[in-house]
Image (cartoon, rainbow, N blue to C red):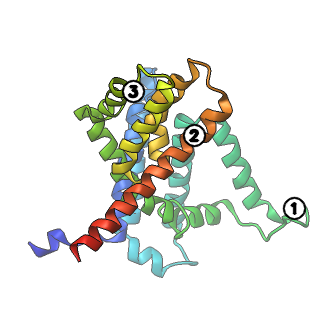
Amino acid sequence: MVRIFEPAATQYHRGIYVIITYVLVFLIYQSRHLVFRILDYILMGASVVTIGYWITNFEAINYRTGIETDLDKWMAMVGVLLGVELARRVVGNVFVIIGVAMLLFGMYGEHMPELVAHAGATFPELCTSIFYRSDGVFGIMANVLATYILLFVLFGAFLERCGAQRFFIDFPLAAVGHKIGGPAKVSVIASGLFGSISGSAIANTVSTGSFTIPMMKKPGSSPMLRAVSNPQRPSAACSCLRSWVRAASSWRK
């Protein structure tokens, strides 16, 4: 029973998150035609197989660094191509063009100008590096997403479903919305309320800014004022949150 509460190993912590992300993207961004929809399920199965292969063979792949087997390389190539397809569905064709250009740059580095030239690598070697190395698909970015960003997303969804996010807008509107300069005051109070619990300036700007920026735009506030004020208020609110935490810690001592 004690092992249930131990932190998950690296391969499970990051691998399960990546598998769920891959499957969800293929489910949300489904193809409209029946034939291509069948292909979506095939791609989902390929995602589970390739990432599951990395999870189950995590230690062996690390020991084989530099001498990967043909199966390792095939799994890496399929995994990288699946990632490109996911990006195409979510971001668009522009990302595919950039990704293909970077892959070609990695493959044909010896033919590049001297300033950016490098030894180059074959396509299997390049995909192996992208898929298995610590700075690849399962690297720092996957760790940050699975550890921190996921918590903010879940917390934001919880607030939205509970109506708390709407409260952060309705309360300032009722308090100062009818006064002179109401939209700006609403923006300050809403950002202060949300920033005091989120602790993230970016999350604050994205969440409350979607309401307060159009609200400030309607009475004619300048774009410069909106651009400057929205990032600054969340930062101030988050600084207040950190000050409250330090004060509470000092008071307990």
Q: Is residue 46 left or right of residue 130?
A: left
What's the residue at 90%, 61% (across, down)? 113
Could you tell me which secondary element the residue under label 2 belongs to?
helix
* Residue farthest front in this picture: 180
- Residue 29 in the image, given as x and y percentages of width and height: 45, 31
Amino acid type at circle 3 is Val
* Residue farthest left in this picture: 1
Relative height, residue 117 to residue 200 (above, below) = below
Q: Which residue is mark 1?
A: 111
Q: In which quadrant is the C terminus drawn?
A: bottom left
Q: Which residue is mark 3?
A: 176
Relative height, residue 33 to residue 195 (above, below) = above
**Earlier along the polypeptide chain: callout 2 or callout 1?**
1
What's the residue at 37%, 40% (across, down)? 24
**Earlier along the polypeptide chain: callout 3 or callout 2?**
3
- Residue 187 in the image, given as x and y percentages of width and height: 46, 33
Q: Is residue 90 left or right of residue 158?
A: right
* Residue farthest bottom in this picture: 63
**Earlier along the polypeptide chain: callout 3 or callout 1?**
1
Front residue of 211 and 107: 211
Relative height, residue 215 to residue 202 (above, below) = above
Answer with the quarter of the image where residue 54 lies.
bottom left
- Residue 5 in the image, given as x and y percentages of width and height: 17, 69
| Numbered tag placed on residue 229 in the rendering | 2
Amino acid type at circle 2 is Ser
Relative height, residue 221 to residue 194 (above, below) = above
Front residue of 162 and 33: 162
Q: Give the Cα separation between the discs numbered 3 and 1.
A: 64 Å
Could you tell me which secondary element the residue under label 1 belongs to?
helix
Q: Residues within 10 Å of mark 3 (few under 14, many from 20)?
A: some
Q: Give the Cα separation between the discs numbered 2 and 1.
A: 48 Å
